[in-house]
Image (spheres, rainbow, N blue to C red):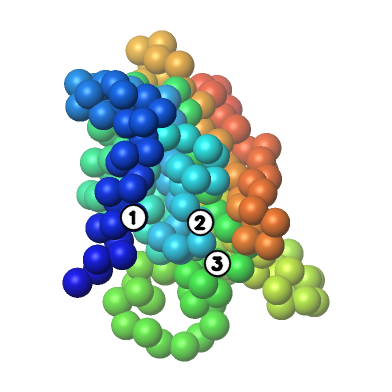
Amino acid sequence: MLDHLKANNLAWSRRKVASDPDFFRRLVRQQTPEYLWIGCADSRVPANEIVGLDPGELFVHRNVGNLAPPQDANYLSVLQFAVDVLKVKHVIVVGHYGCGGVSAAVDGKRRGLVDHWLHPIREIRHEHRAELDAIADERARLDRLCELNVARQVRNVASDVFVQDAWARGQPLCVHGWVYSLTDGLVRDLDLTVCGPGDAGPR
Ligand code: CO
């Protein structure tokens, strides 16, 4: 079963070795990514491919709605390993327009467990209700919610104790917020970057 995937894998591995015979030997010894990507699980947002990075160059955490919940052991384990061990220089929270997680959070339909997972997005919608209600077009309103969600997750990351402690010991680390557009394949920097405790912290 899945023979086409195995065939793709074989071809990919051979291409890699053909263009760089040491490629896999180097990766086995060490991974030294400079970036942690926190993105949506959506299949249309493939992290490495979007930013043109090879295996070993991007540490990736993906979940539904690109959330960084301060009580989620999965995300926190990834963040601590990335910051404390890999010493990544950048954490990039990447949302995307047309996010099914974001629209599912606020469409009022019940889906089960995922409704609990998406609860933080409903909180964000509630906190920004006035701004969002003023946007007449539904698609534009949801896209704005995608941006507000990225902003919240950037603050979650920047205010996390692992990140605060890294800054306290002088480790260079910036947290960024981007949003990806499915329609043109481009990322947009939301200018939320924080690179130190002076411009971070719970707000
Ligand atoms: Co999504």
Q: With respect to residue 115, does 117 lie above or below?
A: above
Task: Find residue 88 and report its horizontal and vertical position in percent.
Answer: 39, 25
Residue 172 lies in quadrant: top left
At x 42%, y 69%, the residue is 119
Q: Quadrant of the C terminus?
A: top right
28 sits to left or right of 193 = left
Give the farthest residue toward the bottom.
Answer: 109
Q: Nearer the viewer, residue 202 or 29?
A: 29
Q: Nearer the viewer, residue 24 or 100?
A: 24
Question: Is 77 displayed left or right of 153 in the figure?
Answer: left
* Quadrant hosting residue 141: bottom right
Query: How many other residues sit within 10 Å of disc 1, few (<14), some (14-19) or many (≥20)?
Result: few
* Label 3 C-beta lies within 8 Å of the nearest ligand 1 atom: yes
- Lateral position of residue 1 relative to residue 158, left or right: left
Is disc 3 surrounded by few (<14), some (14 to 19) or many (20+) residues within 10 Å? many
Residue 37 in view in this figure: yes
Confirm or deny contact between disc 2 and disc 3 (CB under 8 A): no
Which one is closest to the eye, mark 2 or mark 3? 2
Q: Residue at x 61, y 51 (%)?
A: 179
Residue with the mark numbered 1: 8
